[in-house]
Image (spheres, rainbow, N blue to C red):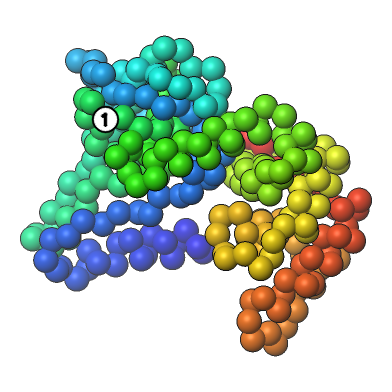
C-alpha cells in the first residue's frame, strides 16, 4: 500500500499539466546508503568507455536498457575492497516533457547524470550479471561540492570502521550509530523471495540495549531511538502493546524503553536474507 501511495504521489502531477519544473526523489541518509552498499569510496570520474552495456537492471526484470560505463579513480576506500579504479554503470537521466507540462529529470533510481571530473563519495553494489558496479537505490552519490562534505566523509569513515567489528562497536562510544547501521541493513528486503532469519543473540541484545540507553530527548533524526525501535516491527505477540489515546508521540517513549529493557534477553532481531 505504501508503494502504491508513493507511485500515486509521484505520478499525480502528470495528470495536471503545469509550467515545467524538475522533480526529484529525496535521497536517503548516508547511513541508509551505506547499509545498501557493498563498496563505498571517495573518488573521481576520470573518463568513460566508448561502448555501452545493454543489460537488465535487476534479475527479476527482463527488460534491457543501455548502461554508460564510467571509470572512477579511487582516492579512499570506506567499505569493501575496491581497487585503484572502479567501473560504474549507470543510465542517463530520463527527460520527459509532457506536452509542455512537467519535466522529469535525473534524481533517484540510479539516474544521476555523471560527468567527467565529478568527485565525491560513491555507494556501490555489484551488477548481478556484469563486471561493473551501480550506485545504490535513489542517490548513491554525495558530490564533493555539497555542504559539509568533509563532515559527511568523516561520518562515513566512522561507519566503515564499525562494520569491521559490529559487536565491539555496539559496546563503544558510537553504539547508537552502530545499532542504526545494523538495523537499517538487516531490515532491507533484498528481493521478492526474501526470508527472515535471527541474528546472533549477543548482537541482538546489544542493539536493543543501545536503543534503550540512547538519548530519547534528542531531536528526531536518523539515529533517534524511537525510529530504531519502530524498525523492530513489534506486534502484541512480542509482548508490546502500543499506547492509545496519546496526544504527543513522546508519550510512547516510556513504554518503548520499558519493553527494550525487559526483552533484551528474550527477543531476537531478525534480518532479511535472499
Q: Is residue 260 left or right of residue 107?
A: right
Residue 260 image-quadrant placement: bottom right
Q: Which residue is mark 1?
A: 118
Q: Is residue 57 visible?
A: no
Residue 96, position in %: x, y?
17, 50
Position above or below: 50 against 200:
above
- The structure residue drawn at horizontal position 54% and vertical position 17%, both measured from the top left corner, is 81
Residue 214 image-quadrant placement: bottom right
Q: Nearer the viewer, residue 82 or 14?
A: 82
Q: Quadrant of the C terminus?
A: top right
- The structure residue drawn at horizontal position 22% and vertical position 48%, both measured from the top left corner, is 105
Q: Which type of secondary structure does the marked residue at label 1 adopt? A: loop
Position above or below: 94 against 165:
below
Q: Is residue 139 left or right of residue 200?
A: left
Q: Is residue 84 visible?
A: yes
- Crowding at mark 1 (Cα within 10 Å: few <14, some 14-19, many 20+): some
Residue 2, position in %: x, y?
50, 62
Residue 5, position in %: x, y?
43, 65
Tell how many labels: 1
> Looking at the image, which residue sits at the far top?
84
Q: Nearer the viewer, residue 130 or 214?
A: 214
- The structure residue drawn at horizontal position 71% and vertical position 43%, both measured from the top left corner, is 173
Q: Is residue 250 left or right of residue 108?
A: right
Amino acid at each position: 500500500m505504501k508503494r502504491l501511495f508513493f507511485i500515486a504521489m509521484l505520478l499525480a502531477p502528470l495528470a495536471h499539466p503545469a509550467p515545467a519544473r524538475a522533480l526529484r526523489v529525496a535521497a536517503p541518509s548516508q547511513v541508509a546508503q551505506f547499509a545498501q552498499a557493498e563498496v563505498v569510496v571517495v573518488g573521481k570520474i576520470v573518463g568513460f568507455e566508448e561502448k555501452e552495456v545493454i543489460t537488465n537492471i535487476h534479475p527479476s526484470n527482463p527488460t534491457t536498457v543501455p548502461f554508460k560505463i564510467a571509470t572512477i579513480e579511487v582516492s579512499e576506500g570506506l567499505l569493501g575492497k575496491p581497487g585503484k579504479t572502479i567501473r560504474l554503470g549507470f543510465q542517463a537521466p530520463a527527460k520527459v516533457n509532457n506536452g509542455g507540462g512537467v519535466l522529469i529529470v535525473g534524481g533517484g533510481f540510479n539516474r544521476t547524470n555523471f560527468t567527467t571530473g565529478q568527485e565525491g563519495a560513491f555507494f556501490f553494489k555489484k551488477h548481478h550479471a556484469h563486471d561493473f558496479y551501480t550506485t545504490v537505490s535513489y542517490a548513491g552519490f554525495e558530490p564533493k561540492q555539497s555542504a559539509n562534505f568533509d563532515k559527511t566523509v568523516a561520518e562515513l569513515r566512522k561507519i566503515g570502521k564499525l562494520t569491521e567489528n559490529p559487536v565491539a562497536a555496539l559496546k563503544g562510544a558510537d553504539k547508537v550509530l552502530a545499532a542504526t547501521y545494523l538495523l537499517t541493513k538487516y531490515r532491507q528486503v533484498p528481493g521478492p523471495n526474501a526470508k527472515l532469519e535471527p541474528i546472533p543473540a549477543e548482537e541482538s541484545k546489544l542493539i536493543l540495549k543501545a536503543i534503550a540507553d540512547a538519548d530519547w530527548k534528542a531531536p528526531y533524526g536518523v539515529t533517534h531511538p524511537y525510529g530504531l525501535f519502530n524498525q523492530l516491527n513489534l506486534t502484541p505477540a512480542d509482548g508490546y502493546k502500543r499506547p492509545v489515546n496519546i496526544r504527543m508521540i513522546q508519550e510512547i517513549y516510556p513504554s518503548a524503553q520499558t519493553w527494550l529493557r525487559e526483552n533484551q534477553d528474550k527477543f531476537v532481531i531478525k534480518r532479511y536474507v535472499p
